[in-house]
Image: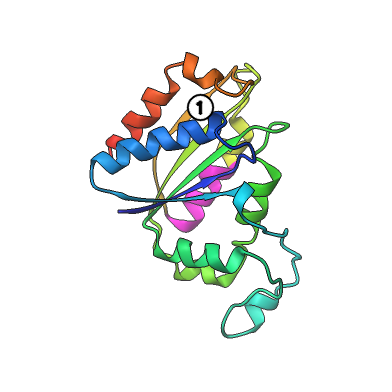
Amino acid sequence: MNILILNGSPRHNGNTQLLAQSFAKGAEENGHKIEFISVDDVNVNPCKGCNACFKNKDMLCVQHDDMAEIYAKLANADMLVIASPIYFYGISAQLKAIIDRCHNPIRDTFHIDKAALLLVGAATLPELFDAIMTEYKLCLNYFKIEDMGHVFVRGVAAKGDIKNTDALKQAFDLGKSL
């Protein structure tokens, strides 16, 4: 499979990136091809809701940013992995901008049929990931995408805290299970 990982953390070498890399190592062991997009390396504006992309036959967005390159990578993916830190009980704003820009009819040309979710939060509340999981399930159902699993990590705030948990092994094992 071609697996695209969207790393929603703007912090290089942080807990989210380490978790995503561990997943990737497991998946690569089974011969899957991995591509990363880190939100800190791209410039993507929020969706304007103008629906111009629905009105023109080439489905182009009126905004000129890095989203066109991301659409090309999404078009080549069989599986999408969403990795994000939790900011105020949601995914990062940068990642949300990319996801919202998939409100474009070009999404209907993608052949993504599998997804996984990797989330990292500093809080330890039992319901920390509930809102994101609800949105994730709604997207899976709407696009008829199979959930391949998730790794949720609570109580990690400082860079590298995730190394003191079993989450990296969980992510590796999830990637290897594909």
Q: Main secondary structure of the magenta part?
A: helix
Describe residue 89's horizontal placement relative to residue 3 as left or right.
Answer: right
Pick the quarter of the image with the N terminus: bottom left
Q: Residue at x 46, y 62 (%)?
A: 73
Mark 1: few/some/many CA within 10 Å (<14, 14-19, 20+): some
Pick the quarter of the image with the C terminus: top left
Residue 116 position, x and y percent, is: 43, 41
In this view, the residue in front, 136 or 178, is: 178
User: Given the image, on which type of amino acid does mark 1 rest?
Assistant: Phe
How many callouts does the rendering have?
Answer: 1
Q: Residue at x 70, y 73 (%)?
A: 51
Residue positioned most to the left: 30
Q: Residue at x 67, y 48 (%)?
A: 94
In this view, the residue in front, 126 or 79, is: 79
Residue 173 position, x and y percent, is: 32, 29
Check if residue 121 falls in the magenta segment: no
Describe residue 6's horizontal placement relative to residue 53 as left or right.
Answer: left
Residue holding disc 1: 152
Relative height, residue 173 to residue 143 (above, below): above
Residue positioned most to the top: 164
Relative height, residue 140 to residue 131 (above, below): below
What is the span of residues highlighted in magenta in the rendered image? 135-144
Residue 35 position, x and y percent, is: 42, 52
Identify the coloring: rainbow
| Quarter of the view holding residue 132 | top right
Residue 65 position, x and y percent, is: 67, 66
Residue positioned most to the bottom: 57
Check if residue 142 falls in the magenta segment: yes
Q: Secondary structure at mark 1?
A: strand
In this view, the residue in front, 65 or 60, is: 65
